Amino acid sequence: MATQLTSPIHDRHVALGAKMADFGGWDMPIEYPGGGVVAEHTAVRERVGIFDVSHLGKARVSGPGAKDFVNSCLTNDLGRIAPGKAQYTMCCTETGGVVDDLIQYLRGDDDVFLIPNAANTTKVVELLTAAAPEGITVENLHRDYGVIAVQGTKSDEVLEALGLPVDHEYMSFVEVDWEGLPVIVCRTGYTGERGYEIVPAWDVTGSVWDALLAEVRAQGGMPCGLGARDTLRTEMGYPLHGNDLSLDITPVMAGAAWAVGWDKESFWGKESLAAERAAKNTRLTRGLLVTGRGIPRSHCEVKDADGNVIGEVTSGTFSPTLKQGIALALCDRSVSLGDEVVIDVRGRAIPATVTKPPFVEVGVRAN
Amino acid sequence: MSDASYPTDLRYTAEHEWVKSTGEDTVRVGITSFAQEALGDVVYVSAPSIGDAVTAGDSCGEVESTKSVSDLYSPLSGEVVAVNDALDATPELVNSDPYGDGWIFEVRVSDPATIDGLMDATAYEGQLG
């Protein structure tokens, strides 16, 4: 690893005594003293939690026709949403592999804001820059903004106390001013709970964090690390790029075909993905709910009752809500919902049932 | 964390296990405060079974947290004579009471003299740096 990058609120995590680890080149909090993955996870499911996810990328595509340009590159269809709305999308190669999955914020016909994954931001910006016609500008704003997620049923109370906008529609955003600098408040998240992802200008991220954290604690919540973020997203079956989506795992395989604008004239990978979708012969991502004892991990083999390998785990963890192992796994098409399978966890055969995620019921879209 | 503690009546291994004499030739085994802190929330313990023969330094089980898995090594050679069944339902005891209710298994040691060959608390703390 070259230089370790740090969030604008890195000093807060160090002061809190957080366990830190590398995420895509950024030194980020995994868990906090007084919390731990299970307690932090539970805080989000039952009340509210606050996450620093400033390692996420930020980029902007602007200029006449920016929306149409982005729409001709990334998979989802910006024509389905109005300005002020955000959308989950993917950046694919011509062969349908996933370079990154990201959120695109449509500000207007000439302005699209992107939130790629930390480790993939440079690549996404490079690809868009290389494809951009005259007049379209692609900017990597990775260190121009922080990102703070407030997630859980008490999120509205937290934001309201600070005078930040709340209760806008799911996947929509509002831009406001904080100490003279811009803050975007988007009703999105990676936990399955009602909540917001707040994108403050880098220099006010600390002040926004301090104010939010005080309110989160007042609501019985706590700061949460990326450990809990991973168990929360796995319970929802949300894919993580690098595990469940990759250059080898396409949107068709990962069950993310809903985020592809199949009717669009063009986007990167369209031909390959359309052919793959029609051929129906690749493995598909399934949920596995462990019925025995043990925790599946990435790359564990999935087998049928006769010991034949029928799949491979892409993400696996312990579900703090269910108190059971859960996994996402790429499985042969012969595997159906309800099937009983076995996961080979370091030589031990752990029984599991094939299910359709999410593994838990939550209220992300509730109004 | 600096508030981790290492009782002086226990013996320790470089793999962060503690050993407590429970009889002439029997010992109880668990993982240290340092180990549970490093692992984070323990959610699953795979202990050896009663009757298993274990060999000093060999893997004989696993301790899993939400984010990682660590091998459990037998600190001494002998036969497993007890396992802590409470960890099936409440593995978090390894975090909350690592030297007490969070014990993992007991061994009848083939050569009791080997117990004294393990580190004492001072030596263990010293090698933690």
Image: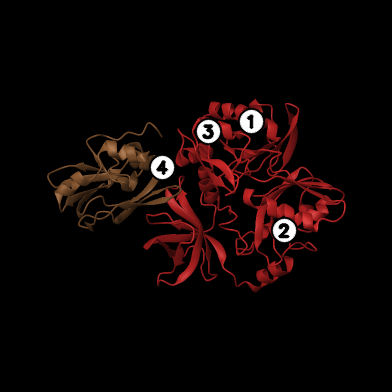
Chain colours: A red, B brown
Nearest-to-viewer mark from 2 and 4: 4
Q: Residues within 10 Å of mark 3 (few under 14, many from 20)?
A: some
- Most foreground residue, A262 or B15: B15
The chain to which mark 2 is attached is A
Q: Name which residue type carries label 4.
A: Ala
Q: Is residue A139 left or right of residue A5?
A: right
Is disc 1 in contact with disc 2, using a CB cutoff of under 8 Å?
A: no
Residue at label 4? B38
Q: Is residue A176 visible?
A: yes
Residue B99 visible in the displayed image: no
* C-alpha distance separating marks 1 and 2: 34 Å
Q: Is residue A303 above or below residue A220?
A: below
Marks 1, 3: nearer the viewer: 3
- Mark 2 element type: loop
Q: Quadrant of the C terminus of chain B?
A: top left
Nearer-N-terminus badge (1/3): 3
- Left or right of residue A73, residue A360 in this image: left
